[in-house]
Image (cartoon, rainbow, N blue to C red):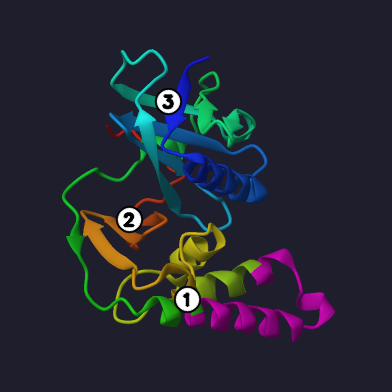
Amino acid sequence: MTVLHLADEREAADLAAFLSRLLHYDRGAAVRLQAVGTALAVFGRPPSFEVLAIRPVRLAKPYENGLDVTLDVTVSAGELLEAVDESAATAGIPAAVTGPPWAGVLPPRGGWRPEPGLPTAQALCATVAAAVAEFRSRTGELPPERRTRGELDRLGREIWSRTVGDTPLPVRAVHAAQALGFLRPPAACGDDEPALLSSGPWLRLRTPYGSVAVRRSGMPALDVSVRRAAH
């Protein structure tokens, strides 16, 4: 099995935590791994949020044999988690799996430009808390005969599709960033504020711990099939 040597034990622990959060939302989750040199990007898609999550991981060296310089493979998130050795700061790469459609719709590597209007991390956390409270309150007020999956989904779409501040970023992207451990209270991440970037149809909420990408409203969803994978 090919082994990735991570920069340190903390990188291994953070990778394991990210994979665990993905598996919480989808026990059969797959992740796409792309690496060049000592930079690894782990892509996943928690279905509850309809976003693409990107977790950067620092590597001590590209591969165990030191020969390969690039990596691009889709694997089981559960099998990858089992292959993470935090004390040794390594991760074995499981056998490749047939990737889900979203794995071929990755955002571009470059061409990102800043988008104005994003609130502070504190305000973003408050927005998510308010949305969660509203959803619970409104669903709790529904009479039993109306508390159906269809009605709950309708309320969820109404609340989570709202945009944040003066940006086109949907609240569900911010919720996903918080749920995946990317968006943390200011006390936990110091002065590092999140940033909103755009490239073509993509919006990307970037934090020091990872990014959440989503296609702009009106663009094809991540579920759709595409002709080729992005490289």
Residue at 71%, 64% in the rendered image: 149
Q: What percent of the width, then of the height, locates residue 140? A: 75, 82
Tell me if residue 99 comes above or below residue 212 in the rendering: above
Q: Amino acid at mark 2?
A: Met
Relative to 103, residue 128 above or below: below
Q: Quadrant of residue 51?
A: bottom left
Give the residue pinned by disc 1.
187
Label 3, label 2: how far apart the Cα atoms are:
26 Å
The 10 Å Cα crowd at callout 3, few under 14, some 14 to 19, many 20 or more, is some
For the residue pair 12 and 119, the one nearer the viewer reads as 12
For the residues bearing labels 2 and 1, Cβ distance under 8 angstroms: no
Q: Nearer the viewer, mark 3 or mark 2?
A: 3
Distance from Cα at disc 2 to Cα at disc 1 = 36 Å
Q: Residue at x 44, y 64 (%)?
A: 173
The kind of secondary structure the magenta stretch mainly shows is helix
Above or below, 148 against 56 in this view is below
Residue 139, how many percent across, how many down? 71, 79
Left or right, 114 with respect to 107, comes to left
- Is residue 195 shown in magenta? no
State the mark number for residue 73. 3
x and y percentages locating residue 163 in the rendered image: 39, 75
**Residue 150 covered by magenta stretch:** yes
Q: Is residue 203 above or below residue 78?
A: below
**How far apart, in angstroms, are the residues tagged by discs 1 and 3?**
36 Å
Residue matched to label 2: 219
Where does the magenta region start and end?
Answer: 126-152
